[in-house]
Image (cartoon, helix red, strand yellow):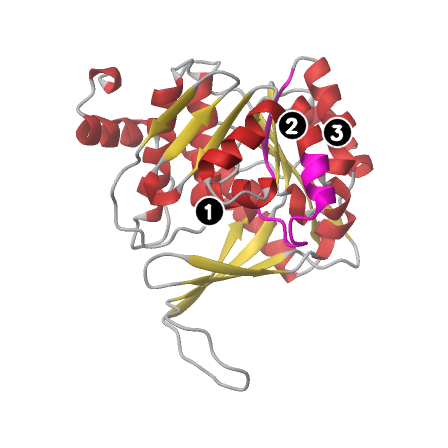
Amino acid sequence: MNSKLSRPLAIVGNLNVDLWVRTVSRFPRWDEELVVDSAQMVLAGTAGYIMLAAKGLGIPTFTISTIGNDAFGRFLLEEMKNHGLSCEGVIVMEGEETSLGIIFVGDKGQRGILSTLGAHSKMDLTLVRSRDSLISSCEEIFLCGNYLLPLMSPSHIQDFAKELQERGQIVFFDPSWDPSGWTDVTRKSTYSLLQHVDVYLPNQEELLHLTAKNSLDEALQEIRPRIAGEAVIKMGERGALYINKSEEIYFEGFRVEAVNTVGAGDVFDLGYLYARRCGWPPYQRLQFACALAAMVISQHRDRQYPKLSEVLNFLQKKTHDNFWDF
């Protein structure tokens, strides 16, 4: 593999355990008990899904995050080792719980999430900077899950993102959903942070809530003047949209059976990053990212993260585009 494509990636964000509960056709009323098909504990969080997808494509990662010294934390470290992932950036905090996401997966692959913060409530820039030897060794820095990290929220990390850019690093940003309700503080601090972000990767619902707009067109008009680089809006089964100050490029996505959409946006993020490393035009970046996500969410068995050859084969079959005939 080209050494440029296999250079390490630093991920700074939310690493946690997910408990997938499926299939949930409806939620129980208070004091009611329902039976579901299965429950599965997995390495997760935006950081977790990004590094698993990166591993499939041959990208080594350093993940900087906080976990507790508890059973869930030990599970995460063991899973990372089992997948051949570096644990160097992970900070184990005594007396704290590891963050847990309980994911309710519906019969069409849709999901709802309940999360605990645990050790994520203590993750701050002082702890992150203690891993700067890892961060500084990477050309790209992925800041993720920041709305779920109280001390790493957009209002806390603006100077940090600016510093990263000033030393020549590329900043990716996917803050996830805001559990505090998309306040004015969230909006203003995110807008300010975007001046120090190269690639912003919200999904459509997140963008609508951030901008307080009712339509995508209105949201795009609001966000375009705020971005310094590019934004990629994930639109689920409707594909994805790329924008910068002057361009707008849309790809309709791939039609697949969505079995489990948990982590789909995070996998897409990594696919887009990889395609951007390759120097491909925006349309092909969207195609590649959508293909990677589609391959992951349509799996019926234990999730596997595709290798490059598998993604290219998928694209060759689905697009009949000579661009993918490597």
User: Is residue 187 a member of the stretch shown in magenta?
Assistant: yes
Which residue: 48% across, 14% down?
Answer: 4
Q: Which of 138 and 167 is in front in this view?
A: 167
Residues at circles 3 and 1 in contact by the CB criterion of under 8 Å: no
Percent across and percent down for residue 156 are: 78, 36
Residues at circles 1 and 2 in contact by the CB criterion of under 8 Å: no
| Placement of 20 over or under 219, stated as above or below | below
Q: Which mark is residue 45?
A: none
Q: Mark 2 points at which residue?
A: 194
The number of discs equals: 3
SS for callout 2 = helix
Q: How crowded is mark 1: few (under 14 residues within 10 Å), some or many (20 or more)?
A: many
Judged left or right of residue 12, residue 35 is left
Q: For the residues marked 1 and 2, what is the alpha-carbon distance in whole angstroms?
A: 23 Å
Q: In which quarter of the image is residue 268?
A: top left
Residue with the most extreme bottom position: 31
Q: Name the residue under label 3.
A: 158
Amino acid on which the number 3 mark rests in the picture: Gln
Quadrant that contains the C terminus: top left
Q: What stretch is highlighted in magenta?
A: 169-190
Amino acid on which the number 1 mark rests in the picture: Gly
Judged left or right of residue 76, residue 153 is right
